[in-house]
Image (tube, coloured by chain):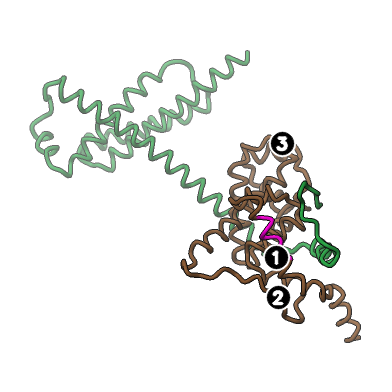
Chain colours: A green, B brown
Amino acid sequence: MKRPEPGHHLPDETIAQPIAELQALPQLSPPPALWSAVRDQMDQQALARRSRRRGWMVSGLAAALALSVGIGVFTTPSTQPPALETALSTPASTELVQVRQLSALLEARLRQQQVGAVSTGALESLVYLENELGWLDIRLASQPGDLELWQRRIELLDEMNRLYSRNHWQTQMKLTSL
Amino acid sequence: MNFSQPLDELSLAALKKRCRKTQERVYLDYSRAAWSLSVRLSGCEAQAWDAVQAGFVRAFERIGQLRDPAAFGSWLRRLIVNQVMDQHRRRFEALPANHEADSDEPLMEDGLDLEQALIRLDPMDRSVLWLHDVEGLTHAEIAELAGQTASWSKSRLSRARARMRPLLEGHRPTRAKHEANANETA
C-alpha cells in the first residue's frame, strides 16, 4: 500500500511499528442509511436539472410568443370582436392572450408535422389526443375566456407535437439503418 | 473491497447510463473503504457521513469524465479526501483571527490507544499523517489535495509524528488490549 517517494519521510524505528498497526486497522462499516441519503441526493439533483431544463424551454417559448405577438401587433389590423377586445384589455386577461398565442403557435407547428406516416402505437395515442382536443374545442366555443381550458389545450397540442417529433425521429432511424 | 480494486468495463458503462442498481452495487463495494477513510481523516462520524455522501454523489454524477475503469477507486478516494479537506479548510476559516494554532507539545495522556491518539491530533495533521503513512500518498499529492505546498505537508507530518510519538512508543496495540481483557475476564 505504501509507496516510497523521493524525499519521502520514512518513519524512524520507534514509529514504524505503530504505523504498521495503523495500516492494519480494520475497515469500518458505514451506517445503513447512508446509501438512502446518497440516492435521495441524486434524485433531488436530477429533479433540479429537469426543472432547470423545463425553465429554459418555457423561456424559449415565451420569447417566441413575445416575438409572434410583436409581429402580430405591427403587421395586422385588429380583427378582434369588440367584446373580446374589451375582455383582453384588463390585466387579468394578459395571461389569456399569452395562452391563446401559444396555442396558435403550437397548432401551426402541429400542422407542419402532420405529414408522413406514423406508427400504429403513435397513431392510437394521436387519435385519443385528437378526440380530447375536439371535446375541449367544443367547451372552449362556449367558454372562450376559460384560462384552464386553454392551458389544457396547450398541453394536448404539446403532447401531440412531441409524439410526431418522436415518430419522425424513429422513422429516420429506421430509414438510416436500412 | 478497498480503493485499489478496479471496476469492470460493464459496470462503468452502466454507471454512465445512471443505472441505479449498478450505483447501489458499486456503493456497497466501496462503502466500507470510503467510510473508514473518511472517519479516520475527519475524526467525526457526522463529518464522515457528509464527506462520503458528497463523494459518492459527485462520483456518480461525474462518471462521464472517467475513461479508465481501473482508476475508479483512486478517483473516488480523491473525491472523498477532497470533501474532508474542504471541511477542514472551512473549519479553519471559521476560526477567529486571533485563534492560536495547535501546540507542538506531544500528547502525554496515558491509556490512549492508536485510534484515540489519532483523533486527538489537529484535523490537518491527522489527515496528512493518515494519507502519507497509511494511504501512501506522496507529499506532492497531499499538498495538491490540501491546496498547499509539499513543504507544508512535510512539516505537518513531522508535527503529527512528534505529537504521536510518546503515545506510540508506549502504545499497547488495541487488539492485544482486547485479548488481554478477554483473558482476564475468562
Q: Which of pointers 1 and 3 lies earlier in the amino acid sequence?
A: 3
Q: Chain of mark 1?
A: B
Q: Are marks 3 and 2 in contact (CB under 8 Å)?
A: no
Q: Secondary structure at mark 1?
A: helix
Q: Main secondary structure of the magenta part?
A: helix
- Which residue matches tag 1? B160
The residue at 28%/40% (across/down) is A149
Residue B32 location, quadrant:
bottom right
The residue at 73%/39% (across/down) is B69
Give the answer, above or below, for where A7 lies relative to B48.
above
Q: Chain of mark 3?
A: B
Query: Looking at numbered disc 3 in the image, what kind of residue is underneath it?
Result: Asp
Q: Secondary structure at mark 2?
A: loop
Q: Is residue B138 left or right of residue B101?
A: right
Q: Which of pointers 3 and 2 lies earlier in the amino acid sequence?
A: 3
Q: Residues within 10 Å of mark 2 (few under 14, many from 20)?
A: some
x%, y% of residue B89? 55, 58
Magenta stretch containing residue B159, yes or no? yes
Residue A128 visible in the displayed image? yes
Q: Both on one chain, marks 1 and 2?
A: yes
| Real-space CA distance between mark 3 and mark 2, rounded to the nearest whole angstrom | 43 Å
Q: Is residue B110 left or right of residue A82?
A: right
Query: Looking at numbered disc 2 in the image, what kind of residue is underneath it?
Result: Leu
- Which residue matches tag 3? B68
Using the image, tell me which numbered label, if any, was put on residue B107.
Answer: 2
Q: Is residue A25 left or right of residue A126?
A: right
Which residues are drawn in magenta? B153-161
x%, y% of residue A173? 57, 19
Q: Both on one chain, marks 3 and 2?
A: yes
Q: A29 and A97: which one is in front? A: A29
